[in-house]
Amino acid sequence: MRVLLTGANGYIGCVLAPLLRDAGHRVIELDSDLFADCALLPYEVHRDSVSMDVRDLQASDLAGFDALVHLAAISNDPVGDLNPQSTYEVNHRATVRLAALAKEAGVGRFVFSSSCSLYGAAGDRLLDERAAFNPVTPYGESKVLAERDLSQLADERFSPTYLRNGTAYGLSPRLRADVVLNNLVGFACTTGEVRMQSDGTPWRPMVHIRDIAAAFLAVLNAPREAIHDESFNVGRADGNYQIRQLAEIVERVVPGSRITLAESAAPDPRSYRVSFEKIGRHVPEFRPSWTAEAGAIEMRDALLKSEVSIEAFTSSRFVRIKRIRELIELGAIDSSLRRIAANGSREASPAAVLATSSPGA
C-alpha cells in the first residue's frame, strides 16, 4: 500500500515509519520538522520525506496514495493551551481539510490519530467507544471535533478510522519527557525522585508507542468493513493505571529512587479509564505486548546509558512546550506555529516524491 505518513519525524512517527516499511508498505514521510533537533538516539530521516506544514497541502500533493496516516498535530495539553486557536486550526480544521483533499485525490483510507483525552473528566468508570465526551482542554476538544467532521466524509469511496490512543510512553529516537511515565522515569534516573505532578489519584489508559504503531499497521492491513468509520480505543486490557501506581512501578525499577510530590501537585480533573475490547474484536491482528513496567525499564536503561542530566531532561530538547516557546523567541515560527521561511520556496510535493521513489525503498 502507498502510504503518506504525516508527523513522521515526531515521537510516534519515527517509530511507526520503519514499521510500515518493514511490513512492505511504500511510505512517504511528511513533517514540519519543528522538533528536528530534539533527539535522544541517532535517527536518520528517510530519503522519501518532505518537510511541509500539513496546512499547506493540496489535493495534487496526495495523488497516487492509497492511504493517509495522520499523526501530525499540536500534540499535548500545555502546547495546546499556549494558543488554543492554533490548536483548533491544526488539530481540527486542518485535519478535516486534509481528509477532504485526500478524498478528492482518490485516497481510499484515512487513519486518524485521535486520543482518549476526548473522554476528559470521567472518573473511574470504564468507558468504551460509545461513552460521552467530556474534554477539559483545547487538545481534547479538538479531537472530538475532528472525529465528528471526519465521519461526515465517510462513504463508499473514503474510509476514515479513528484511533483513540491512550497516554503514550516508551523509548523513541525523538523522546518526549512531557508524558507521564517517561517523566516519572526521567526524574527518578536523574534526581532519585519519582516526582508526581498530581496527587496520584487520576486514572490514565497507558500504551507503549510501539503498540500504538502496531495498531496503525493492523488497521491498514484490516478489511475495510472492519474499520470503516469506526473509532477504537488503543491499548491493552490491563493498561489502566492511577498515577500513583505508575510512580510505584518506577520506584521499584529505578534503584535508590523514592516517590515525592512536586510543590505544585494537586488533583487533576483529567481522569479516565477505558475499555480496549472493541479493537480486539474488529482488528484481531492488533496484539499489544508492552507493559508499563517493561516500558519503564526500557526508559531507565536508555537514560542511564545516555547519561542524561536533569537539566537536559527538562530542557527544550525533550519538553515540547519549551521547544515551541524557544522557536517563537528565536523568530523561527510565528504565533500560529508556522515556520518563518527565508524565502517563498516550496518543498517537493509528496506525490512527486512518491512518483520517483523506489517501490522497494
Image (tube, rainbow, N blue to C red):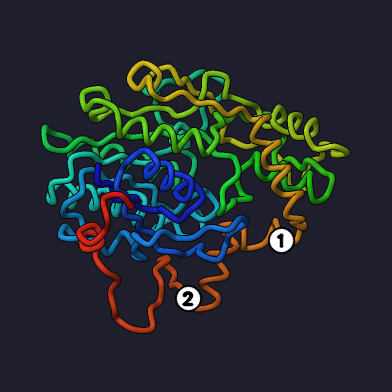
Closer to us: 205 or 292: 292
Q: Residue at x 44, y 49 (%)?
A: 13
Q: Picture coordinates of residue 361 (x, y %)?
A: 33, 52
**Residue at label 2?**
332
Q: Residue furthest bottom?
A: 343
Name the N-terminal-most of marks 2 and 1.
1
State whether residue 73 is above or below residue 324: above
**Residue at label 1?**
312
Q: Picture coordinates of residue 8 (x, y %)?
A: 41, 53
Q: Is residue 77 left or right of residue 215?
A: right
Closer to us: 173 or 326: 173
State whether residue 79 is above or below residue 270: below
Q: Is residue 354 left or right of residue 157?
A: right
Residue 265, numbered label? none
Q: Is residue 152 left or right of residue 278?
A: left
Q: Picture coordinates of residue 121 (x, y %)?
A: 52, 31
Mark 1 Cα shell of 10 Å, populated few (<14), some (14-19), many (≥20): few
Q: Picture coordinates of residue 111 (x, y %)?
A: 31, 39
Q: Residue at x 33, y 34 (%)?
A: 162
Q: Residue furthest right?
A: 256
Judged from the image, the secondary structure of the residue bearing numbered disc 1 is helix
Q: Residue at x 80, y 30 (%)?
A: 252
Judged from the image, the secondary structure of the residue bearing numbered disc 2 is loop
> For residue 251, which quarter of the picture?
top right
Q: Amino acid at mark 1?
A: Ala
Q: Is residue 260 left or right of residue 72?
A: right
Q: Amino acid at mark 2?
A: Ala
Q: Residue at x 50, y 64 (%)?
A: 36
- Label 2, label 1: how far apart the Cα atoms are: 22 Å
Mark 2 vs mark 1: give the one in front. Answer: 1
Location of the N terminus (image quadrant): top left
Mark 2 Cα shell of 10 Å, populated few (<14), some (14-19), many (≥20): some
